[in-house]
Amino acid sequence: REKRCILNDGLLLDDGRLILLWEESEDLWNTVYRGVITDGEITIDRVMEPTNPLHTLTGISLMGNDEKIWCFFQYKGFSNHLYVSESLDGISWSEPASLSLPLDINCIIECSNMEVGALQYDTEKIRLYRSDDWDSWEEELLMRLDDPVFFYGTDEDNGILSAACAVNTHGQLLVAYGTKFGIFTTFHSEELYREQQSLVQNSRTLSMIQWILVGSPVVIFLWMWKNGSGTIGSVIVHYGIYVCLLIVISLLIGALIPPE
């Protein structure tokens, strides 16, 4: 290609066809092309013709198999829309149909149970929108950074910088995400997610109890000192014994709190 290109996605089918989706710079805007390579020959077409020279298009992803292929892209103009086109051979495509999805979708995959999933992420959370009819979508939270097994933080350089997902042959959803610490992968499981949420809640409760026990001796000491309860020596002795007991209790509670 003569102009600068950005490859959005590629799809290699079992019959040997290679489908490509890419963007090309056109002065002030981008347009999106798709092509199919079969037996060394390539057929290229635009996903959509912009209605305004200042509008631009962004490629999202490809999905499909030997029987049907889907192409997803975004049109950015006075209003932004996500579109999908279908094809049986990768050469002739249907007219783009608008999708009722958030605009910052990263990729669309084929899930189990005849569903499709659209991945969305920000610095704190990764979500998956599922649908079995392309019209109604159900939001599912895959992970968030306040879980103890993930990095905590919401700043741009501390949060999620990129994310992708795929489904393996067993129907398990594999989520990959990138942070400034590197790229990590995890299998998403509803049961595991519920256990993580319970662990987070228990950790917060134990932490609160720990801080209450650590701070209460100060309050008790000030109260005893103000009311003149006992001599100074007895106050200090009772206070010291209480502090020692609370240190032991705090250490035991701290051992129960899992590290983040």
Image (cartoon, rainbow, N blue to C red):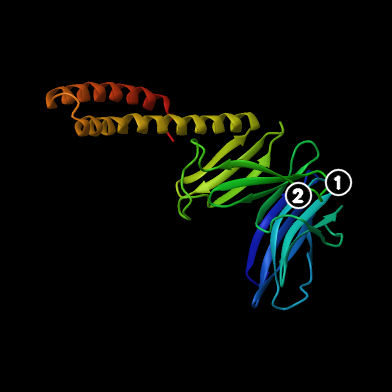
Mark 2: which secondary structure? Answer: strand
- x, y (%) of residue 64? 79, 47
In terms of depth relative to the viewer, which is nearer, 156 or 222?
222
51 with respect to 124 (left or right): right
* On screen, residue 197 above or below 241: below
Mark 1: which secondary structure? Answer: loop
Can residue 238 be seen here? yes
Q: Residues within 10 Å of mark 1 (few under 14, many from 20)?
A: few
Q: Quadrant of residue 217?
A: top left
* On screen, residue 139 above or below 97: above
Q: Residues within 10 Å of mark 2 (few under 14, many from 20)?
A: many
Identify the residue at horizontal 81%, vertical 43% (top origin). 132
- x, y (%) of residue 234? 15, 22
Can residue 40 be seen here? no
Q: Quadrant of the C terminus?
A: top left
Q: Quadrant of residue 89?
A: bottom right
Q: Please, what is the three-letter code of the amino acid marked with disc 2? A: Met
Q: Quadrant of the N terminus?
A: bottom right
- x, y (%) of residue 24? 67, 69
Identify the residue at horizontal 56%, vertical 51% (top origin). 162
In terms of depth relative to the viewer, which is nearer, 174 or 196?
196
- x, y (%) of residue 137? 76, 47
The residue that label 2 is drawn on is: 63
Cα distance between the residues tagged 2 and 1: 11 Å
50 with respect to 182 (left or right): right
Q: Quadrant of residue 219?
A: top left
Identify the residue at horizontal 69%, vertical 56% (top origin). 102
* On screen, residue 189 above or below 92: above
Farthest residue toward the front?
Answer: 227
* On screen, residue 151 above or below 73: above
Q: Please, what is the three-letter code of the amino acid marked with disc 1? A: Glu
Q: Which mark is residue 67?
A: 1
